[in-house]
């Protein structure tokens, strides 16, 4: 794969570009982004070799789409319209149902592979792009059977080269489970940040009292609203259910405190310590 | 300070012992713990030099109390009864009001310094003790004026030697603010862990989908229930208020989703991104 087009060159796209270039030095990386400053930055950083536009996609061997998920839904049919017969298009969106649905009847559906690399940091933009971001990380691939064999193979080769573990899943299950293990964490962090900022906004000194525990728990509240608003919108139904369960658990914890039932609070925490084994599995 | 007694030799006490020994190699570190296995472990690890009992405290130059806060409240009067006239006693509890209240009229009140080192990890026990845990961390000291000058000075010297920044605060304010910047994070992590475990308990595969964001947000749910239950109990009133605000914010976020008001959700997140500046201040 020689001509590689990155649509969106922020943290996700930029990190892909860096890793691809490392494993395939003869590849030429083209950047397409609505944000001209991002294009200039990523050129200056050497993340891309050249600027390009959607009109150039006919020449692409590979197109990686890492833009907000609402824009992906809008733009993906146009991208598929413009590519060549042997071009592989991969997206990297945090939701999969709406994206797969949107292109299910597209004549070039078999050129598209729906993916969700579970990787990232709370930072955004080309400057946030880092080498090795995907090493050892999971990549969820949806509806793999809808992509042609040859292009499936190309995609898997690429993911293997940059060190990703592959998991296959249908888009509906993906969106349901990712609500729990990723999207809810973002809401909990944003609302925790909001609660503390609202309370302490006039007392900057108070943040001297915050330690690494607070930092860890609210870290995701630094995430980009432009990226996350459309994710929450597309995964609204699952997230409302998830949030209700979370709120109920918090409510119940509060009631246990009000009833002075601290032995039950102890049990709740002890049961949840099981998260240790789960987190060991993540590493 | 030559004879130093650690009451409680888990993560907090053990890490103090390691740092004190490093800065004061001639000091002898004695360990007192209700858990005999902890004593053996910390002896084997070299965290303490010798086992001791409360009856030995008369000979102590310094006593550091790092045990669950309910036990501190019960035990502190006895500790003060047993120490010598020039012994300094420092506690390390995450709550300060109940502890200060308990000893306010004790004849040896002036030998006690109420402290809360904002440091730790989610791990516990002597094996969790690490060198340099306190470097650059904040230590909140309450009611400093109630400790004799000479012992204040000794304590400050020690904290400076191991690299801590000192902040002074009254115990009521301490407990109120720490509810927001520390205790709430623990509840949010425990309940997030619970929500996800309950939902996904029969689908271990799902945790393959969890990434570093989830890990960061639930990390504190690995914390010790034995340590945290009494903290929540002692800080109950503040925590109920804090939890109510957090639940309201989550509820409101859910309602914005139900109303499809994603422009307001964008604004909420953008406002909370201000946490970046706050977290930069923590580092």
Image (cartoon, coloured by chain):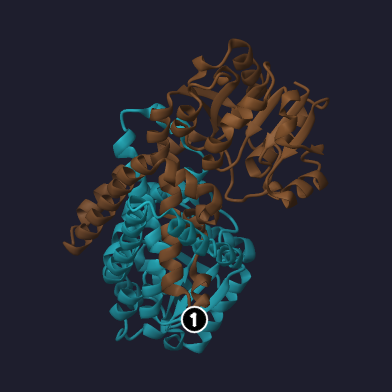
Chain colours: A brown, B cyan
Residue nearest the observer in this picture, A84 or B245 = A84
- Residue A256 on image: x %, y %: 20, 57
- Which residue appears at 46% of the width and 62% of the height? A193
- Residue A186 on image: x %, y %: 46, 50
* Residue found at the far top of this picture: A149
Please identify the quarter of the rendering in which residue A15 is found.
top right
Q: Is residue A235 above or below residue B32?
A: above
- Residue B66 on image: x %, y %: 41, 63
Residue nearest the observer in this picture, A99 or A54 = A54
Q: Which residue is mark 1?
A: B168
Drawn side of residue A133 relative to residue B171, left or right: right
Secondary structure category for the residue under label 1: strand
Drawn side of residue A65 relative to residue B209, left or right: right
- Which residue appears at 56% of the width and 78% of the height? B156
The quadrant the N terminus of chain B occupies is bottom right
- Residue A54 on image: x %, y %: 70, 34
Q: Chain of mark 1?
A: B
- Which residue appears at 30% of the width and 70% of the height? B73
- Which residue appears at 35% of the width and 79% of the height? B172
Is residue B71 visible in the rendered image? The answer is no
The quadrant the C terminus of chain B occupies is bottom right
């Amino acid at each position: 794969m020689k001509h590689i087009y990155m649509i969106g060159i922020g943290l996700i796209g930029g990190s892909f570009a860096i890793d691809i270039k490392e494993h395939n030095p003869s590849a030429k990386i083209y950047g397409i982004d609505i944000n001209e400053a991002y294009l200039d930055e990523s050129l200056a950083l050497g993340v891309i070799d050249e600027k390009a536009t959607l009109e150039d996609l006919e020449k692409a061997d590979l197109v990686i789409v890492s833009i907000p998920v609402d824009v992906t839904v809008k733009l993906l049919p146009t991208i598929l319209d413009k590519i060549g017969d042997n071009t592989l298009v991969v997206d990297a969106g945090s939701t999969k149902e709406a994206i797969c649905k949107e292109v299910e009847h597209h004549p070039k559906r078999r050129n598209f592979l729906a993916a969700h690399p579970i990787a990232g940091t709370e930072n955004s933009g080309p400057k946030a792009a880092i080498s090795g971001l995907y090493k050892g990380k999971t990549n969820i691939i949806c509806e793999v059977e809808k992509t042609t064999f040859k292009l499936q193979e190309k995609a898997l080769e690429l993911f293997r080269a940059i060190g990703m573990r592959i998991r296959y899943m249908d888009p509906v299950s993906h969106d349901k489970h990712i609500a729990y293990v990723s999207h809810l964490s973002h809401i909990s962090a944003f609302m925790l940040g909001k609660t503390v900022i609202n309370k302490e906004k006039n007392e900057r000194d108070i943040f001297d009292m915050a330690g690494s525990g607070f930092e860890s728990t609210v870290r995701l509240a630094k995430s980009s609203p432009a990226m996350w608003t459309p994710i929450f919108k597309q995964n609204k139904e699952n997230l409302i259910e998830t949030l209700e369960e979370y709120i109920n658990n918090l409510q119940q914890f509060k009631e246990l405190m009000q009833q002075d039932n601290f032995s039950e609070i102890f049990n709740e925490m002890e049961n949840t310590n099981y998260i240790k084994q789960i987190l060991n599995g993540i590493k």
